[in-house]
Amino acid sequence: MLSRTSLRGLSRAHLRCNLSTRASAILSALEISADTELAGVYHGEWTGTGDILESVCPTTGEVLARVRSASPQELQTALEKSREAYELFRLVPAPRRGEILRQIREALAAKREALGALMSLEMGKIKTEGVGEIQEVVDIADYAVGLSRMMNGRVVASERPGHSIYEVPNPLGVVAVLSAFNFPVAVYGWNLALSLAAGNATLWKPSPSTSLCSIAVTKIVSQVLEQNGLPGAIAGLVTGAKDVGEAVVESQDVDMVSFTGSEAVGRQVGKVVQSRFGKVLLELGGNNASIIMPDADLSLAVSAVFFGAVGTAGQRCTSTRRLYLHRDIAPEFLSQLQSLYASVRPGDPLEPTTLLGPLHTRAAMGVYSSAVDRLRKTGAEILTGGALYEGLASPLDGGNFVMPTIAVPKTVDLADAVWKTETFAPVLCVGVFDELEQAIKWNNGVPQGLSSSLWTRDIRNVGKWIGPVGSDAGIVNVNVGTSGAEIGAAFGGNKSTGWGRESGGDAWKQYVRWSTCTINYSDKAPLAQGVQFSSAA
């Protein structure tokens, strides 16, 4: 009799045969071979002798490839190579660094469709979102090209005659980027673009479950660097599990750590980096709310909430988790929203008509089921969903598909886990309010503070929402959903989301070492504040 392990092996082998044409076409377009173990470390050359990471397709359960992660010695070598690369790259003029970024932008844009397809294959998001994520990296590279000629300091007036004060941005050092599975390329792209523009070396430690995405992108970026006679370790890569991430975070060779992930892990990352006086940028949990006023355009609001809650199968940090409806429009809004939910069917994320792909892992299905069980135990009404999909046709029967869920808890008790905890799955909790002030209190009453959204046509509501007594989130939208930020403004959240800011706005200022320089061009050396300190002759 075959063991369960053997049966799973046979099942995976069977799925591999079914998937081979589909998967191999995507991988070959990016020069990735699934026939051999892949090197998961890059520091100017490709290597990898550490533990094996399996890349698993969440749509079918198929093992796509096996990646050799970084051994302790390979990680140390990568760190040393990153430092050496930084010491060279910091001397390259910023506009020249911008030209390198322009070429990286062109190289990524040329592979946009292939990279988007790989993301669908390995992460599970639908194709249009995968391609859109690559476009986001292209856009931030565009932004950083211009930024390379505009990373200005300041001239400050001095109180002393013949003196000037300058605030000067200089390259920082080695920036480590620890990215999450849900945006396996964009988060790295945000950091890489700003870091390179600033003159730093970047070392990428991706999620272990999206190693193929990181390898594909690193191959493209490294080719541009090599073509320009620059060391590949300017944009290095170390794949691995928790031990590799911990070693990167603890390393004194890393000047700044940019971490995207859970609140629990982010709290530990912050403590470790601060304990060695490094810089840290945290992008953590989002427990985002949309508030719908009675004067809102319901057709627009319903569509936005639908995308915010169901898009990426609820696995965006900006996904809509909480929905607060004014009592006057709650029944109509929920009726329209349930109709949209009823139209959704799970499918292959590579198919253009699919709106609902899988959760990324089997473990995520367990998180979803636990959240639904908790809602039921507290007496919440499940309006739709609340179960795993069963009986799907092959090969989707091997995937991680769950039903998007709308739940109405009995009360809005912000001390209850159903409200204060982020569930990384398509679970939407609904509360009904009578006054905007009550909804704002609910919006702000959770530990997280990433994204928020108010739907209204009343300018007085807008002023209240974006002002001192309004939303305390980092992203405060009006008549726009919680998901779908653009690159031109800073992206990030407050409170237990970590206070980090990436992408546009002033985010670049975190990637430089600031020098305050007072220059005396006179023949005297007066002290500030009128201090006299001279000895009697």
Image (spheres, helix red, strand yellow):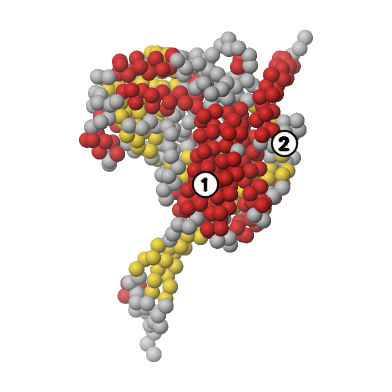
Where residue 4 sits: x, y (%)? 71, 14
Question: Horizontal and vertical percent for residue 219?
Answer: 66, 43
Q: Nearer the viewer, mark 1 or mark 2?
A: 1
How packed mark 1 is, by other alpha carbons closer than 10 Å (few <14, some 14-19, many 20 or more), is many
Measured from the top left, where is residue 146 in percent x and y?
47, 53
Dot 2 corresponds to which residue?
38
Residue 469 in the image: above or below residue 507: above
| Contact check, label 1 and label 2, Cβ < 8 Å | no
| 284 displayed left or right of 452 | right
Q: Amino acid at mark 1?
A: Ala
**Crowd class of label 2 (few under 14; some 14 to 19; many from 20; radius 10 Å):** many
Q: Residue at x 55, y 61 (%)?
A: 93
Residue highlighted by disc 1: 141
Distance from the alpha carbon under mark 1 to that under mark 2: 27 Å
Which image quarter holds the N terminus? top right
| Tag count | 2
| Nearest to the observer: residue 423 or residue 358 | 358
Q: What kind of residue is marked 2? A: Leu
Q: Name the residue: 56% across, 41% down.
A: 109
- Please report whichever mark, 1 or 2, sits nearer to the chain's N-terminal start: 2
Dot 2: what SS?
strand
What is the quadrant of residue 348 in the picture?
A: top right
> Callout 1: helix, strand or loop?
helix
Where 219 sits versus 454, above or below? below
Residue 107 visible? The answer is: yes
Q: Residue furthest right?
A: 1
Q: Is residue 292 left or right of residue 365?
A: left
Q: Residue at x 29, y 25 (%)?
A: 297
Where is residue 315 shown, x and y percent of the image?
Answer: 50, 28
Relative side of 375 to 367, left or right: left
